[in-house]
Image: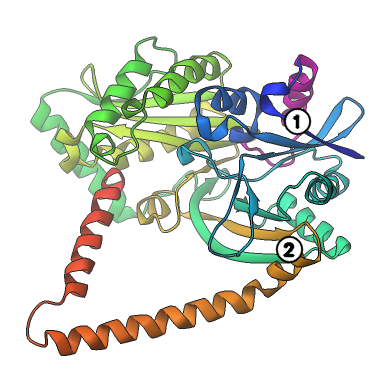
Amino acid sequence: MQTRLVKVHDLTAEDERSWQSLTERAVEPNPAFESDFLILAAKHFEDYADTTLVVAHEGDVFRAVLPIAKFESPRLPPRRVATIHARPAALRPVGTPIVDGGHAGPAVGALLDGLHDAAKNQGWPGILLLDWLNNDGPVAQCLRGACEQRGLPVFTKEIWDRGMVNRGGRWENPLTKERQRQLGKRRRALTRDSGAEVHVVDRTLDPAVVEEFLVLETTGWKGHDGGLAFGRDPHTAAWFREWFPRWAAAGRVVLLCVNVGDSSIAMQCYLRSGDGIFCFRTAYDEAYAKYGPGAMLIAAGTEYLLEHTDAQWIDSSSDKGNAFLLELLPERRNLSTLLIGTGGRLDRGVVSALPAMTTMVERLRRVRTRRVRVGLKHADPGGASPASSAATRVAGEASTEAAESRP
């Protein structure tokens, strides 16, 4: 099996067809790494513009695709890394490479060989950073096995869980009785106070829904200064306007709304990829926040998708520690961030040393924290310390960031 590097903007029509065909054979789905998603991202976003695909192939047949968005120089490790990171981060619900299910082992090995050759001959970084990787999936298993065979060190920087549900698992009954009672009470209160019927509507093919979604998201907390509402940035808005109709027409996206009468007060966009569904984007009218429209929609949407699709699972696509979605989608998917030494002796040595380096950094951080606390205590023993004020400010910022996830 061979490997080649190709810029997204240099792909031929035959390349795009091979990439799309690979997607249909993928052992694990990843909508963000599909051709008709990533090509548009490269068109609209500067951070994606120079994305290079590492392609494992046999002749014209693609066996695996790993997009490298850019090279970075993080504080740790103290070497450049090749990363799948790109902004806006909301465009990537998972970071697992696209790999042919019938050739997973050789294909993953070919990706690693291609990265090694790029580091040796083309000046690429000799360290790969993979984040949001499905840690328990077949691609991760093949990746670790191929690294072991080649003597490439792997450092697991982080492992965490996020919410999901499986058909045949908790999908049919995901909520606790207390949460069901709470949602029922709030829905009845909304019906009473509004004087209108509260119901869930599938507006995927409604021509007006794209602009309504952009407006609704922008008027919420994500539309404030520093927020990441799609409508706040002309590039993101343009991408959404072009991407959404394409995927809607192909049956690859579902947009559900909680309506009060004829008005949509909450919207949830879902992506279909392979045998699963990824939660993608949420917006709601903050004037109705006390009724919990976000929780109401996710609960109702989970039920709707169970009845109206043949998907086998729903992935929340949430960040680490999102308690809201961990509750509403109570099964778990294990994700990880890996650093792999793909280059020469120095890069491999750095990755091998990362466990000791991170332990040392953490110890130094704890020592500095203790010293700061002792200094503040002596400086102002009777009043509120700057540390406590900072903690209050951080807590407030965290509360704002979590506003979308209010029950």
- Does residue 120 belong to the magenta stretch? no
Give residue 352's quadrant in the image: bottom right
Q: Quadrant of the N terminus?
A: top right
- Tell me what residue is drawn at x 26 percent, y 46 percent: 403
Quick one: SS at disc 1? strand
Between the residue at mark 1 and the residue at mark 2, the CA separation in whole angstroms equals 24 Å
- Tell me what residue is drawn at x 39 percent, y 26 percent: 256
Residue 382 screen position, x and y as percent: 7, 86
Specify the principal SS of the magenta part: helix
Residue 347 got which mark?
2
Residue 166 got which mark?
none
Relative side of 321 to 349, left or right: left
Residue 400 screen position, x and y as percent: 24, 49
Could you say which is closer to the camera, residue 355 or residue 299? 355
Relative side of 121 to 84, left or right: right
> Magenta part of the protein: which range?
13-30
Up-down relation of residue 382 to residue 300 (above or below): below
Marks 1 and 2, the one that precedes in the sequence: 1
Amino acid type, mark 2? Asp
- Residue linked to disc 1: 6
- Tell me what residue is drawn at x 73 percent, y 63 percent: 347
Residue 365 screen position, x and y as percent: 42, 78
